Image (spheres, rainbow, N blue to C red):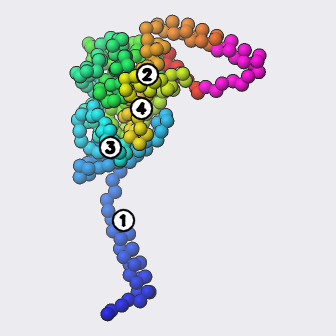
């Protein structure tokens, strides 16, 4: 029988390794999640794995081309990781915020006027976190609560009643969800930043109000392994909407300023009492108010 000595075997493995390395350098490489949707087109089956930092977690993202439905309910039976999110092509239209479909299902929402009682119920918040409404409907509700108003004559959103501080930073309503569902930095950065700004405006006592509010309706929260940017941002928007409903809804800017003044006075009195008693100051996370 023919046999090969150890040195020959070693040389053979080195030769094969060099051949494999040479071949690998000649394979084409694809950089996913660019600012153009066409970058997704590689045999119609591209998967990306970028990482987006959110308020409480780092979620592994996946995206592939295709799909026109931006209201796909998540598959709760998928135990392998986050749901695969598909780029939503209609949202690429700059006029999508004014022309996209809203209020065609069970979710109560209209572009006209300000927010209504029926638009900010707990049932509506549940629909947001369970993806029973589309991304545009979530954005539209937050826009109205922030004070943006839809002008039917010009078919545009205007900041006519937006809180002054927020209006200065966002004269046009930002996308809090990432409706395009493209999570590259150049495409998603504005959505991520505006969502973070919205979250920072929630006072500490309302930061964790979502789960207790919706638990009576049967919602027990998300599992970490199934989180996606879409789910996370929907939950953050719903959390802000609960804060808005409880603290801001129905008040004028002047009334809110007076509430803030009284709250500041009460805080100053508590601080004076704390110093007098020599107790430690309770730490609270910073809050940037929207008004």
Quarter holding residue 115: top left
Q: Earlier in the sequence, mark 3 or mark 1?
A: 1
- Residue extending furthest toward the bottom: 1
- Residue that carries the numbered disc 2 in the rendered image: 213
Q: Nearer the viewer, residue 33 or 101?
A: 101
**What is the distance, in whole Å, between disc 3 and disc 1 at their CAs?**
35 Å
Q: Quadrant of residue 213?
A: top left
| Residue 141: percent from left, percent from top | 35, 20
Q: Does the magenta run of residues contain 280?
A: yes
Q: Which mark is residue 78?
A: 3
Q: Dot 4: within a 10 Å radius of its alpha carbon, few (fewer than 14), some, or many (20 or more) residues?
A: some
Mark 1 lies on residue: 25
Dot 4 and dot 3 residues touching (CB under 8 Å) = no
Dot placed on the residue nearer the N-terminal end, 3 or 2: 3
Q: Earlier in the sequence, mark 2 or mark 4?
A: 2
* Real-space Cα separation, disc 2 to disc 1, in angstroms: 55 Å
Residue at 45%, 32% (x, y): give it: 193
Q: CA distance from mark 2 to mark 4?
A: 11 Å
């Amino acid at each position: 029988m023919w046999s090969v000595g150890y040195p020959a075997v070693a040389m053979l493995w080195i030769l094969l390794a060099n051949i494999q390395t040479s071949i690998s350098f000649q394979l084409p490489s694809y950089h996913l999640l660019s600012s153009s949707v066409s970058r997704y087109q590689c045999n119609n089956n591209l998967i990306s794995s970028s990482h987006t930092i959110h308020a409480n977690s780092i979620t592994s993202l996946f995206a592939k081309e295709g799909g026109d439905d931006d209201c796909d309910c998540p598959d709760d039976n998928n135990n392998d990781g986050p749901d695969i999110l598909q780029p939503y092509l209609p949202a690429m239209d700059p006029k999508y915020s004014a022309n996209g479909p809203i209020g065609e299902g069970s979710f109560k929402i209209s572009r006209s006027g300000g927010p209504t009682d029926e638009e900010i119920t707990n049932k509506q918040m549940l629909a947001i976190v369970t993806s029973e409404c589309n991304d545009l409907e979530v954005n539209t509700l937050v826009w109205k609560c922030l004070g943006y108003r839809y002008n039917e004559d010009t078919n545009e959103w205007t900041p006519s009643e937006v809180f002054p501080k927020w209006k200065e930073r966002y004269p046009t309503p930002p996308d809090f969800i990432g409706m395009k569902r493209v999570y590259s930095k150049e495409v998603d950065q504005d959505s991520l930043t505006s969502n973070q700004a919205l979250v920072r405006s929630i006072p500490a006592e309302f930061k964790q109000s979502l789960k207790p509010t919706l638990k009576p309706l049967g919602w027990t929260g998300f599992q970490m392994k199934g989180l996606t940017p879409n789910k996370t941002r929907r939950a953050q928007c719903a959390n802000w909407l609960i804060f808005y409903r409880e603290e801001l809804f129905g008040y004028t800017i002047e009334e809110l300023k007076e509430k803030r003044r009284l709250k500041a006075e009460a805080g100053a009195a508590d601080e004076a009492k704390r110093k007098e008693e020599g107790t430690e100051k309770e730490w609270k996370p910073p809050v940037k108010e929207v008004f």
